[in-house]
Image (spheres, rainbow, N blue to C red):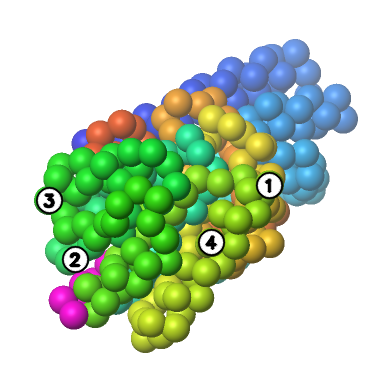
Amino acid sequence: MGIFKKIGNALKKTRESFARKVDSLLSHGELDDDFYDELTDVLISCDIGVRTSMDLVDSLRVRARKTKIRNAEDVRNELKLILKEEFDSLNKIEIEYPAIITIIGVNGVGKTTTIGKLASYFKSQKKDVTLVAGDTFRAAASSQLNEWADRTKTRIIKHSEGADAGAVVFDGIASAKARKTDVLLVDTAGRLHTKTNLMEELKKIDKIINREYPEAHKYNFIVLDATTGQNALSQINAFKDFVQIDGIVLTKLDGTAKGGVVVAIEKDYSLPVVFVGTGEGVDDIELFDSSEFVENLF
């Protein structure tokens, strides 16, 4: 299945929900104040966020006066143009090598699965990949990552359960340097901001990476579950106080009618969504393409 088709399928629920509601709004009236108020509510229901939805509708009002928008298709097309301009104004991440990608996030968002999919993705790009089982806190986390290593035929560096996560990362870096590995994918324990010891552990891992491999290109990617909608934003807030967040991996995009959370994330935090999960298979992860995303959103 092509990338465009995967994204299209993943956003099908969001697109159909939006189209149905906008068609209903325009079936009994002009683009008046009531229409714009109701359109704002529709955008919010797609998890685009209150402030971002209001900004989009304000921009649409201005353009509608100039372009004489009259039907639902025109509304959708104009919103696409506005959003594309928003996305184009943001910085994008081009992953450079050797790369160390540390995966962070709360429990249950799919971090370990994401690492397995990323391993498959980078190997499909002809990159040498090593996994680091830095989640020594959760029971069976290492064995779960090991299953992904077996599945993707990827090397893994791991210690016993309860070991010091920093020590595992240290060994992973030593191995990556010795073997000239292109991509080191570091798993970390799922945590909430209330788990101060685990948050401090993240800072320690960051420090070890900076000290031991300063010449590598370092990225901290937070994994967010698209089905949680606006709650994903509070998770960004919790983590950015402890470590720098460079980008986002959005999982379960195929399981929600609220794909608009991507817009809220990029607008509110100026953080790029780098990868999106588009299904349950090992290959169901794609580099985020904002133009393709917007085309399939409405």
- Residue in the picture at 33% in, 32% down: 279
What residue is pinned by disc 3? Answer: 153
- Is residue 247 depicted above or below 229 in this figure? below
Tell which of 146 and 222 is nearer to you.
146
Reading the chain from its start, which is encountered first: label 2 or label 4? 2
What residue is pinned by disc 4? Answer: 201
Identify the amino acid type marked 4.
Answer: Glu
| Residue at disc 1, secondary structure | loop
Q: Nearer the viewer, mark 3 or mark 1?
A: 1
* Mark 1 and mark 2: Cα distance apart in space: 37 Å
| Residue at disc 3, secondary structure | loop
* Mark 1 and mark 4: Cα distance apart in space: 13 Å
- Quadrant of the rendered structure where residue 166 is? bottom left
Relative to 56, 244 lies left or right: left
- Quadrant of the rendered structure where residue 197 is? bottom right
Would residue 140 be seen by someone viewing this image from the given angle?
yes
Reading the chain from its start, which is encountered first: label 1 or label 2? 2
Across and down, in percent, residue 250 comes to 47, 44
Reading the chain from its start, which is encountered first: label 4 or label 3? 3
What residue is pinned by disc 1? Answer: 194
Quadrant of image for the N terminus: top left
Relative to 69, 296 lies left or right: left
Reading the chain from its start, which is encountered first: label 3 or label 1? 3
* Mark 3 and mark 2: Cα distance apart in space: 13 Å
- Residue in the picture at 64% in, 63% down: 242
Identify the amino acid type marked 1.
Answer: Thr
Relative to 233, 40 lies left or right: right
Asked if labels 4 and 2 touch by Cβ distance under 8 angstroms, the answer is: no
| Tag shown at residue 127 | 2
Across and down, in percent, residue 84 comes to 56, 53
Tell which of 161 and 106 is nearer to you.
161
Quadrant of image for the C terminus: top right
